[in-house]
Amino acid sequence: MKNPLIFYIIIILMILSIVILTPIKDVPKVEHLKTPLPAVNTPQYKEPFNVWNNVIVRVDDGPDIYTSELVKTLKELGVKNAIFGLIGRNIKNYPDTLPEILNAGYTIANHTYTHPRMHLKRVRAYYIRNPEQWRWQIAKTNDTIEEVLRSKGISYQCKVFCCPEVPNYLPPLLDEIVREQGLVPDKGWDIDSCDSVRNRKRLNAEEIAYRIDKLSNKNCKIKILIHSRKGRWSDELKEIDKILSNSKEIIARRLNNVKREPI
Ligand SMILES: [Zn+2]
């Protein structure tokens, strides 16, 4: 070709025609674009307010002076599942709290009559040698719960057993006695607030919120163990709720310098 300019123009025109004529894949048809798409609010992180639906709060060692307030707070926060492991001998001092627990939709569980320290080997050995004592601990508590509620016009049969200080394991003989009285042992917890563990620092609201947030991503139920007699729980639960209403990033930033044990 004599004129190189014409040659280049022809080449450019050829390239443009290829680009223009090649069909572009995955372009929606025009009629689809006419229909407005529904608005979708994609959350940036798991919706924290739903966390309480997924949390079980186990409150051991009551009833006590804090139980009523705690029931109200749990309800207010929207905690759907709470188990109150009651110590039989404490019940007569706070009988009005029992219907309050049930009216809020929560469970009353048997936590023995005198709260033997079952994490100690010698205590477990004592009850294995004296199973009738163990049977008494459970039956007496069940009777007390039922009697108090009956006096208030409520028929209730306790069905859950929360063993004092033993999250998962009960010697087979003692486990059998629990079951023969119609109770199912409540198994463990995911977050121990450590509010009654000697030599371990009680977790603060931020540390608990962090653990809830982290576990909630696994989409499973999370059980937290607290003890109402340690007080302050109403305030702390509200504080946890406040922290969870912020984003994960805020929790992470706040906790950045907090030394904590791995979950
Ligand atoms: Zn206890």
Image (cartoon, rainbow, N blue to C red):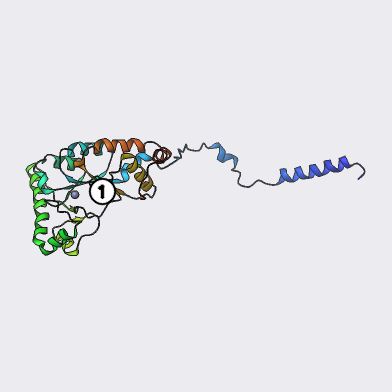
Q: Position of residue 192 (x, y in %)?
A: 28, 48
Nearer the observer, 108 or 120: 120
The residue under the point 16% across, 39% down is: 100
Does dot 1 land on a helix, a strand or a loop? loop
The residue under the point 11% across, 58% down is: 134
**Number of marks in picture:** 1
Q: Locate residue 138: give its quadrant.
A: bottom left
Nearer the observer, 64 or 258: 258
Q: Locate residue 236: give its quadrant.
A: top left
Residue 251 visible: yes
Q: Position of residue 21 (x, y in %)?
A: 72, 45
Q: Position of residue 252 (x, y in %)?
A: 41, 41
The residue beneath circle 1 is 199
Name which residue type carries label 1: Asn
Most distant residue in the front direction: 199
Q: Is 18 situated above or below 132? A: above
Q: Position of residue 226 (x, y in %)?
A: 24, 45
The residue under the point 19% across, 64% down is: 172
Q: Is residue 234 left or right of residue 92?
A: right
Nearer the observer, 107 or 87: 87
Residue 77 visible: no
